[in-house]
Image (tube, rainbow, N blue to C red):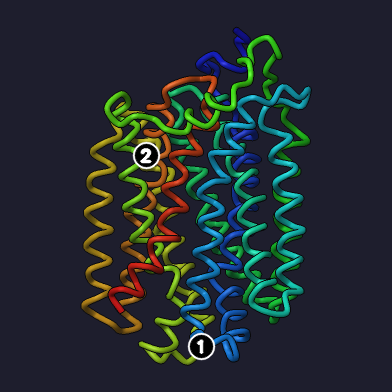
Amino acid sequence: MTAGALADPTERVGRGWTATLSLANVAIWVGWYGPLQILLAQQAEDFAPGTGMSKETLLAWVTGVGAAVSLVANPFFGALSDRTTARWGRRTPWIVAGAAGGALSLLLLAGAGGLWAMAVGWCLVQLTLNAAFAAVTAAVPDRVPRLQRGVVGGWLGAAQILGAVAGTGLATATGGIAAGYAACAVFVVAGVLPYVLRYRDLRLEGADRPAWSSKDFLTGFWLSPRRYPDFAWAWLTRFLINLSNALVILYLLYYLRDRLRHDDPEQGVLILTAVNSVTLLATVVVGGAWSDRVGRRKPFVYWSGVLMAAATALLAAWQTWPSAIVVAALLGLGLGVFMSVDFALMTDVLPKALDRGKDLGVINVANALPQVAAPALAATWG
């Protein structure tokens, strides 16, 4: 067995490694959230006339199909990276290819002239950026010892929300749909370069890669809840939290515009995202470091979930602009603790070192599946 690639890591990673991997994560989330928060909603409004669909329905279909692509792409590319024996390592080739493909796909979206081009472009964004995200996520259990994963998970959680803010800001500040997509594309490529250029990835030797079997490859994506109950609970917890978050995010622009009658809903989305980010950043690293120190993860997950549930209920009961600001702050506090501790928890319950990328991809399905379920639930309740 190749100690560097498959052994449980024991040497602590430095600040530079954590910072550059976090920046790569920021870049990927910019590529997702610039479109999700602003640009796709604007395109849906432009393309809806003549399609027989409302802007809400068109947006739901496009994001839903894209999320379906994400459901397959993340574990698939994670599994491919597990088997990669390139001299650049297992993860780096997929980070580079995914980021480059994501940038090109965003540029394709920038030139979309109708519904089908919009849908194809968004599916390609999901396909390629999930390849990069699967590899970035798997780098943590490859390199970070267990007692450091809370704080590293905290920084990666902070990177996700900073990516959401940066993506929303780029989409808003550029003043146009095409320019917004182009800015996000440039950021995606620039953000991954420091990590892939500065840090050498761990290489898997060919002798350590199992023989190819299509049956074993496909059946490997199923992990029995009975055999791996901790893994199953980690997946379900992440799914439920992300479902709640997706229900809020998907229609936030329309909520501000149509329900609260906000004067500038695009700016309102940016303000709420910024408020959420400030409170999230106040807890995300601290929560992860605290869980490392006490050696326990579950209590942090429990209480952060309770806080987020209460905040979401408040948003439904008190529909005003001030209440939206309060809810954004409370959700940030809870989500900050959850993101860091949950990430550390899920890396702790991975079944096999050889399948880290694939197994994390299966858990990351809990990020994408809510994007499919949320529009369906919202349409049913609406």
> Sequence order check: which comes first, mark 2 or mark 1?
1
Q: Element at badge 2? A: helix
Q: Which of 274 and 215 is in front in this view?
A: 215
Is residue 36 placed above or below 363 in the rendered structure? below
Residue shown at the point (60%, 68%) measured from the top left: 35
Amino acid on which disc 2 is placed:
Val
Is the residue under label 1 in contact with that under label 2 (CB below 8 Å)?
no
Residue 310 in picture, x, y percent from top left: 21, 63
Amino acid on which disc 1 is placed:
Asp
Residue shown at the point (23%, 44%) measured from the top left: 302
Q: Is residue 346 left or right of residue 23?
A: left
Disc 1 packing (10 Å; few <14; some 14–19; many ≥20): few
Residue 331 in picture, x, y percent from top left: 34, 61
Residue 112: name its quadrant: bottom right
Q: Is residue 136 visible?
A: no
Residue pointed to by mark 2: 341
Spatial CA span between label 2 and label 1: 35 Å
The quarter of the picture where the N terminus appears is top right
Is residue 54 placed above or below 187 in the rendered structure? below
Q: Element at badge 1? A: loop
Residue 330 in picture, x, y percent from top left: 31, 63
Residue pointed to by mark 1: 264
Residue shown at the point (76%, 50%) measured from the top left: 100
Residue 115: name its quadrant: bottom right
Q: Nearer the viewer, residue 130 or 58?
A: 58
Disc 2 packing (10 Å; few <14; some 14–19; many ≥20): many
Q: Which of 261 and 360 is in front in this view?
A: 360
